[in-house]
Amino acid sequence: MSTQPLVTVFISCYNRQNFIRESLESVLKQSYKNIEILIIDDCSTDDTLKILAEYQDDRIIILKNSTNMGIPYTRNKGLQNATGKYFAILDSDDICTEDRIEKQVTYLEENQDVVAVGSQVETFGLNKRSFICKYYNTYEELKAQLIFNVPL
């Protein structure tokens, strides 16, 4: 039995047949292994669910909304169904580095006064200029940025 805390990696998706495989693969390849992967499909009309059905991994839990409800509803449903100590969000058209969860859990476990962590973002893909977006590190910076956007 693992002594590492369970992490729920949450992916909400809607019509992501072109991205969901790569996104899910990036989670399955994590160096941190004590994860459950909670995927909630928001009534996709493409082959997203068919692609997800190809995966036979006990860590993957697939739920489906009965009607298209949007991101806020779907994320709340994810929170309600998560069983991990930590909740990691991954958008269904994103990929994460192999050590993302390991680094974040290590930091949270070593800093019990911290309640949330984020990371840098690198954009890539067709018609996109690659760049790295750095986020804020201090409480004061985060608090100030919350007036204008979501800085995590």
Image (spheres, rainbow, N blue to C red):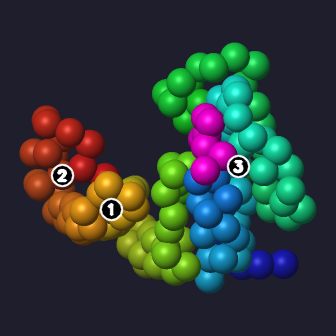
* Residue where numbered disc 3 is placed: 38
Looking at the picture, does residue 68 appear above or below residue 9? above
Q: Which residues are magenta?
A: 10-18
Q: CA distance from mark 3 to mark 1?
A: 24 Å
Q: Secondary structure at mark 2?
A: helix
- Pick out the residue farthest to the top: 67
Q: What is the three-letter code of the residue carrying label 1? A: Thr
Q: Residue at x 51, y 30 (%)?
A: 71
**SS category of the residue bearing label 1:** strand
Q: Nearer the viewer, residue 108 or 88?
A: 88
- Nearest to N terminus: mark 3 or mark 2: 3
For the residue pair 111 and 146, the one nearer the viewer reads as: 146
Residue 123: mark: 1
- Of tags 3 and 1, the one toward the viewer is 1
The answer to whether the residue labelled 3 contacts the one labelled 2, judged by CB atoms less than 8 Å apart, is no
Circle 3: residue type = Leu
Name which residue lies at 27% across and 67% down.
130
Marks 2/1 in contact by CB < 8 Å: the verdict is no
In the visual, does 114 lie left or right of 11? left
Rendered location of residue 1, percent (x, y): 84, 78
Q: Which residue is mark 2?
A: 142
Residue lying at 89% horizontally and 62% vertically, measured from the top left: 56
Indicate the amino acid at tag 2.
Answer: Leu
